[in-house]
Image (cartoon, rainbow, N blue to C red):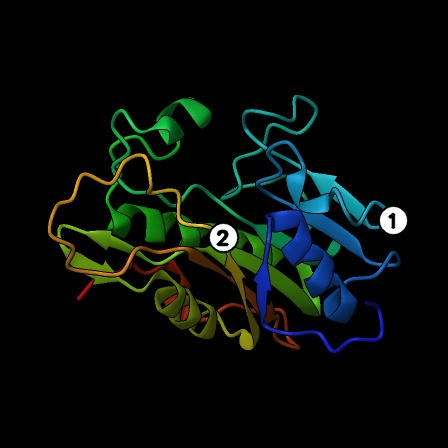
């Protein structure tokens, strides 16, 4: 419903979420850089947007590491970042999906550092007062909660960006076939988050941008 208000909690898939986000923040006049393009599933419901995709694995013409791209500084209105965020995959299907090299054996500390590096690069290529969209999901590591969306909020603020909006995507938890009746200590995560950061007027980054990520 185009006249309905844009809401923060959405159900469905990533393209459903992006279509809702686009109603507030994206338009065909903007140049959008998707730094983790994958197969382009984000954009299936918004074909009118001007999206330049890059990906180490799936975009042969632009096989760029999202932490270091050849784009000139300030050359895009919007940058989008959705790196793999499942830690220590081992034999998990994400290891095959991302061909093993991106998150194989990584801890959440490592993955959050990837986010920091990627957000720093995304900020560089985005014009002042542009937008950075960052997708993530909270998780459990070694029996402890990792509030990834909170860490990304803090990284964005340290980089000098304004956390303008936070969207949620709810999906059915894929646990029915894998549930073995073990004692449950935390709720299963069936909600992911997408931050909308606004870049600063100056386009400069914080002095903290090169720092390491810590987990308490």
Q: Which residue is mark 1?
A: 48
Judge the density around disc 1: few (<14), some (14-19), many (≥20) Cα neighbours within 10 Å: few
Can residue 198 be seen? yes
Q: Measuring 13% from the left and 50% from the top, which residue is drawn there?
A: 142
Secondary element at image label 1: loop
In the displayed structure, 204 sits above or below 100; it is: below
Secondary element at image label 2: loop
Q: Which residue is mark 2?
A: 171
Q: Position of residue 216 (x, y in %)?
A: 17, 66
Q: Position of residue 191 (x, y in %)?
A: 44, 59
Is residue 164 found left or right of 145 in the rendered image?
Answer: right
Q: Examine the image and state in which quarter residue 149 appears.
A: bottom left
Judge the density around disc 2: few (<14), some (14-19), many (≥20) Cα neighbours within 10 Å: some
Q: Examine the image and state in which quarter residue 99 appears.
A: top left
Q: Measuring 71% from the left and 63% from the top, which residue is drawn there?
A: 20
* Sooner in the amino-acid sequence: mark 2 or mark 1: 1
Query: Disc count in the image?
Result: 2
Q: CA distance from mark 2 to mark 1?
A: 26 Å
Question: 213 and 13: which one is in front?
Answer: 13
Q: Measuring 33% from the left and 41% from the top, which residue is drawn there?
A: 176
Q: Position of residue 90 (x, y in %)?
A: 25, 28
In the displayed structure, 180 sits above or below 24; it is: above
Q: Position of residue 56 (x, y in %)?
A: 54, 28
């Amino acid at each position: 419903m185009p006249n309905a208000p844009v809401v923060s909690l959405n159900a469905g898939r990533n393209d459903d979420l992006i279509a809702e986000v686009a109603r507030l923040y994206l338009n065909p006049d903007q140049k959008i850089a998707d730094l983790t393009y994958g197969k382009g599933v984000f954009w299936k419901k918004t074909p009118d947007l001007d999206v330049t995709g890059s990906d180490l694995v799936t975009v042969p013409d632009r096989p760029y590491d999202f932490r270091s791209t050849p784009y000139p500084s300030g050359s895009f209105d919007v940058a989008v970042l959705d790196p793999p965020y499942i830690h220590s995959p081992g034999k998990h299907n994400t290891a095959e999906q991302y061909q093993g090299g991106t998150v194989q054996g990584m801890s959440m500390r490592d993955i959050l550092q990837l986010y920091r590096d990627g957000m720093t690069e995304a900020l560089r290529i985005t014009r002042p007062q542009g937008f950075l969209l960052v997708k993530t999901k909270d998780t459990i590591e070694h029996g402890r909660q990792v509030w990834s969306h909170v860490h990304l909020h803090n990284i964005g603020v340290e980089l000098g960006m304004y956390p303008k909006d936070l969207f949620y995507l709810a999906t059915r938890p894929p646990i029915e076939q894998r549930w073995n009746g073990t004692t449950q200590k935390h709720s299963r995560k069936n909600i992911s988050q997408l931050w909308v950061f606004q870049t600063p007027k100056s386009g400069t980054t914080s002095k903290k941008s090169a720092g390491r990520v810590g987990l308490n």
